[in-house]
Amino acid sequence: MGDTLGGARTGARAGGARIRYALALAWRSGRFQILGYGTLELVAAVVPVGAAWLTKLALDAIVGRSIGGTALAWLGGGLLAAGLTAAVLPHLSRYLRQELERRIGLTAQDRLFAATERLTGLARFENPVFLDRLALAQGAGGSTPGMVVFGVLAVCRGAITIVGFLGSLLMISRWLALAVLLAAVPVLAAELRLSRLRAAMMWRISPMERREIFFQRMLASVQAAKELRLFGTTRHFRDLMTAERREADAQRRRMDRRDLITQSGLGALAAGIAGAGLLWALFTARAGGFTAGDIPLLIASVAGVQTAVASLVSELTQAHHKLLLFDHYLTITASGPDLPVPAEPQPTPPLRRGIEIRGVWFRYSPEHPWALRELNLTIPSGRSVGLVGRNGAGKSTLVKLLCRFYDPERGAILWDGVDLRDMDPAELRSRIGAVFQDYMEYDLSAADNIGLGDVRDRDMDRVRAAARRAGVHDALAALPRGYDTLLSRLFSAKPGHDDDHEVGVHLSGGQWQRMALARAFLRDRRDLLILDEPSSGLDAEAEHEIHTRLREHRAGRTSVLISHRLAAVRDADLLVVLDRGRIVEQGAHAELMARGGTYAKLFTLQADGYQPAMDVPAP
């Protein structure tokens, strides 16, 4: 019993916190829209009650001939004013409501992605539960605060309307008033239960919807089109997409059936009460118990109370449903950084001595094997280090740790003797330039694609210089709009225009690789340069050209090089051979070749592919 009460109190406190946060967000987004909408709602609550009473008074006066023409004209004018107000108010309310929703959506979206910006690491973006929560938060964050505001105002409006009509019913029949009021209790209880079930259903189908979106994008993707058509797998992925939709639709259908049964039962209850009340009123009027104006007042009152209750319950249950989903938004916006950042981080000075990797162990989760084991390595300042090894040896993982996308589970990485965990990640990364193996192809202009390498100092002269150094300037200058050409066919350069000349262009894989290099060259004032397979998409001539440029660029700079083509890293000052997360060899190229170990075997295997074939005598 105590646990139940404690859980209820905790749930109530959590619900109250959600409501307060949502209301505060809505108020900051559009306080004047809220005040205007609230005023219109209060007026809309009074108008139907006033119109019903004016109608009763006018009918009673006409039947009893107890009122003069002037008074009757005033009653008619009041009815006209009520009608005009009732006609105009919904349009004004809708405009203010939509404007408030837009403002709230903008604020909520900005806060949500500001929260994701605080996630300086990668772990949560590789967690499917977090991605499901983020997908629901994007929908609930922008709509919940508005629904809470509209729910609160709907309560006020509904209360005024209900009280006004109930007062009218009490004057006619207290039993009928009580029956109409009590009928609202099961309606509210049933709707709240349905909103909880619907929120739970949306959480269950969120992974299915994300997978369906993934299949949709792949089936419409230019990158996937070649393989899908060559391998004949389009139908296969279409079937997978359809299966996800069918499963999600099946759960929605079950929920809709619950809605149908519940709503039909509640509708039948409301209709029964209204019909019984009207029948009773007709027999009572026949016996002379009511005046001519009492019948329309009673009908309007019963209908008004039921309509107000239905509207109030609808707004409340929608707000309740959104509040349940709002937990996902609050969880993300209230979460702290995924990587700990000290309150007073150590400054990240220019690299003078070097980077020391001391006894580092790392795995992506307790369920994963160790990616790095007892790693000890020094990267001297101004020197180049080449990381060599088979796939899965830990090379790219080490790069992620150097950029502090993750923290070691054991050991430390020191920047001139200072632990990376004691620094501000943003300041650390401002001193690093990198080309990753899975580099980005942004659906932006050529200038923007390169300029993203250093948005704080994006000068077109520097952008062109970086492009020249990467060997892609001539290709970009020859595009239809030069560096302003959109490098995408997802969007139009001029939205709304049908001119084919304004459609973006595609670059080749090698040109995109050079764009990624140009981004790194734009960060030429950084202390550490990381090159992870920087020439994997280039032909032999382009690869030689790029590595010549890279040697010139990294001369005297601290750099970490990764490449499966060992000839591309053989001139590094220090070669480090990784195997299953451990360093098995390190030294210069000549030294490692003389040892005849793992590096020598790998290098020899690659070199054999470039040797002329020996003539083999026929048997």
Image (cartoon, rainbow, N blue to C red):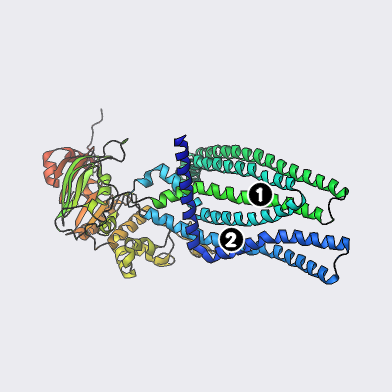
| Mark 2 vs mark 1, CA separation in Å | 19 Å
Q: Callout 1, which amino acid?
A: Ala
Residue ID at (70%, 49%): 306
Q: Callout 2, which amino acid?
A: Arg
Q: Which mark is residue 310?
A: 1
Q: Can residue 172 be seen in this view?
A: yes
Residue labelled with disc 2? 97
Q: Nearer the viewer, mark 2 or mark 1?
A: 1
How packed mark 2 is, by other alpha carbons closer than 10 Å (few <14, some 14-19, many 20 or more), is many
Q: Can residue 221 be seen in this view?
A: no
Q: What element carries label 2?
A: helix
Query: In the picture provided, is 247 more to the left or to the right than 512?
Result: right
617 and 284: which one is in front?
Answer: 284
Image x and y of residue 611, in percent: 22, 42
494 and 333: which one is in front?
Answer: 333
How packed mark 1 is, by other alpha carbons closer than 10 Å (few <14, some 14-19, many 20 or more), is some
Q: Can you name the residue that lies furthest to the bottom here?
A: 70
Image x and y of residue 9, in percent: 46, 43
Question: What is the tally of numbered marks visible in this picture?
Answer: 2
305 and 195: which one is in front?
Answer: 305
Query: In the picture provided, is 51 more to the left or to the right than 320?
Result: right
Note whether 57 is above or below 194 in the view shown: below
Q: In which quarter of the image is the C terminus?
A: top left
Q: Can you name the residue that lies furthest to the top here?
A: 619
Query: In the picture provided, is 415 more to the left or to the right than 327?
Result: left
Image x and y of residue 201, in percent: 53, 40
Q: What element carries label 1?
A: helix
Q: Which mark is residue 114?
A: none
Query: Mark 2 and 1 residues: CB-CB less than 8 Å, in contact?
Result: no
Image x and y of residue 598, in percent: 18, 38
Work out whether mark 2 precedes mark 1 in sequence or the reverse, and give the earlier one.
Answer: 2
